Image: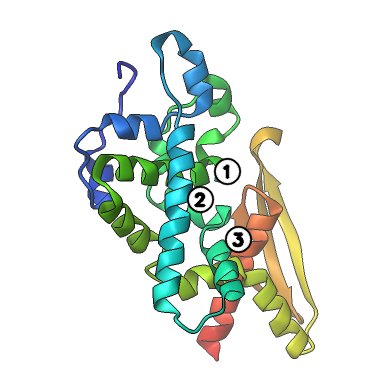
Amino acid sequence: MTYSTNDYTELEEKLGYKFKDPDHLDTAFTHKSFANEYRLAKVVSYERYEFLGDAILEFLSSRELFKRYPEMPEGEMTKLRASLVCELSLSQISRELGFGAYLYLSKGEELTGGRDRNSILCDLFESVLGAIYIDGGIRPAGKFVNRFLLNDIDKTSAFYDAKTVLQEYAQRNNLPLKYDLINVTGPDHNKTYTVSVVLGDKTYATASGHTIKSAEQLAAHSTITEINDKD
């Protein structure tokens, strides 16, 4: 692929997987906006890889939950799986792995903050998973999912349910709970929201995100961690 400028050596070390055909990673990191700009060069976006990765992720996470929790009813497994593979969880992992730095975007998407957008980073987790599967099969794909998503299921699911858990804690202890919007920065197309948790008469964690919901989720999770550590 003539447009490729990425050196994936460091990324492959993080992933713990060496690609036989690095072109798969080029495709996994190509946003449709970039592909549209290079239509004549037949550049392909990550959408098909993402489609495949999504199916593989559902299978691998379902298989792991089935094995790990033999007594868990189907409904609870469905809810737990949803918490593990939600956009916020997958985008956080992609952000920690630095996927955004390898992304091929159009100039317009670049200017509007696409490189750090949760929806795109979530897509990248699935497209990279699809690329690993195509290049190496189900075994390395499973290792990738287990290492970065399923290694601490309790922590990941607690993150997803953080606001609910904190609300239940507040109700049990008769404490008023609110989220204060502290600051909003950045242009209209790429804002960052900062919120803090106020529980009772005490201000707990402060966190930032590209949506108010994600900022509240992060702040709630940090607050729960702080409360648990004290208890």
Residue in the foreground of this view, choosing between 219 and 95 = 95
37, 177: nearer the viewer: 37
Rendered location of residue 11, percent (x, y): 28, 44
Residue in the image at 31% along x and 44% along y:
132
Q: In this view, does 92 lie to the left or right of 130?
A: right
| Gap between marks 1 and 3 measured at Cα | 19 Å
Tags 2 and 1 touching, CB below 8 Å: yes
* Placement of 116 over or under 5, stated as above or below: below
Residue 127 location in percent, x, y? 42, 41
Dot 1 or dot 3, earlier in sequence: 1
Q: Residue at x 31, y 40 (%)?
A: 134
Quadrant occupied by the C terminus: bottom right
Q: Residue at x 35, y 63 (%)?
A: 146
User: Gap in Å between the C-alphas at discs 2 and 1?
Assistant: 7 Å
The residue indicated by pointer 2 is 91
Residue 180 at least partly seen: yes
The residue that label 1 is drawn on is 119
Q: Tag count in the figure?
A: 3
Residue 113 sits in quarter: top right
Residue under label 3: 207
Asked which secondary structure carries label 2, the reply is helix
Q: What amino acid is found at the position of numbered circle 2 in the picture?
A: Ser
Residue situated in front as seen by the camera: 18 or 103: 18
